[in-house]
Structures are given as C-alpha cells and as structure tokens.
Image (tube, rainbow, N blue to C red):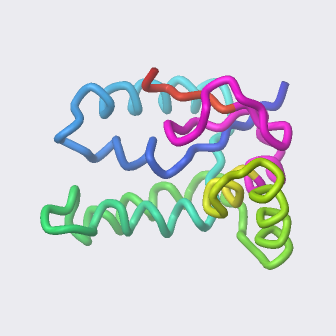
Amino acid sequence: MSDRVFVDTNVLVYLFDAAEPKKRSVARQRLDLERQRRELVVSTQVLQELYVCLTRGKHPIASTEVALRAVTEAATLTVVQVDTALVLEAITLSQEHQLSLWDALILRAAAAAGCATMLTEDLNPGQVVDGVRIDNPFR
C-alpha cells in the first residue's frame, strides 16, 4: 500500500468554509490523521482551484490574503506538476471512464505520484480508477 494520499480541492476548501462546520471539522481531522500516517499530495491544478474556490462569488469563503496563505500552505505538500503529457493522459482517461477532464486530470496526477487513495467528495467512494481508490471523508 502506498504511503501517499492525494487530496482533492474540495477537502482543502472545507478547511475554511464556516458555512459547513461539520465538513470543516471532518476535513481537519482527516487531514491531520492522514498527515501522521502518510505523505499528502496535491497537484498544481488543486492549488489553482483552491484559490479560485476560496475567493469567487458574491460571498467568498475567504479573503484573497487568506486564500493566498491557504495555497502557500498547500504548496508545502508534495506537488505534482500538471504538464502536457499529464493533460493528454487525462483526456484518454476521461474518455475511457466518462469523467470530466478536470476529475480525470486529478486522478492522473494522483496515479503519477503513486497515490493509492484520493480524498474527494466528487467521485464514487470505493471506485478505483487508474489504480487510485476514491475515499469520500464526508460520507
């Protein structure tokens, strides 16, 4: 079993979402637990999405300053660089599994980093795609 776990954007966003106190608590506890047991991994896509998710909309979750600090902190984890090869592989994965390109790109990044598990609420828990098992910490 891999000692790496990939963290999707939504899990990181909940660390800051005061409107979702239960999910905020679950995200914090789960990430603290995983950090003790395994290496946490994100991708450059996750870093970008984190900033946008925290700052967008009429009532953003966080200020731009807090969002920058969140991205800076997330960037201290192991970061997979999204490059041309990864994008092309994700397109194929997207077609094979009827996934959005964005979900396929995150899964390819997780697989490329050797992660056995991905924490996300966006995909089917227990499903294995490209060798990565989906785990929804909020279920």
Q: How many marks?
A: 0
Residue projecting furthest to the left:
59
Q: What is the quadrant of residue 124 in the picture?
A: top right
Above or below residue 5? Residue 103 is: below
Residue range highlighted in magenta: 108-133
Above or below residue 87? Residue 66 is: above
x then y, percent, for residue 136: 53, 28
Q: Which residue is drawn at 73% across and 37% down?
A: 4
Q: Residue at x 25, y 45 (%)?
A: 17
x then y, percent, for residue 20: 23, 36
Above or below residue 90? Residue 96 is: above
Above or below residue 35? Residue 55 is: below
x then y, percent, for residue 14: 34, 42
Q: What is the quadrant of residue 34 in the picture?
A: top right
Q: In this view, does 25 lie to the left or right of 9?
A: left
Q: Is residue 14 magenta?
A: no
x then y, percent, for residue 131: 85, 37
Q: In this view, does 103 lie to the left or right of 83?
A: left
Q: Is residue 82 left or right of residue 135?
A: right
Image quarter in which the N terminus is found: top right
Q: Residue at x 61, y 61 (%)?
A: 102
Q: Is residue 128 magenta?
A: yes
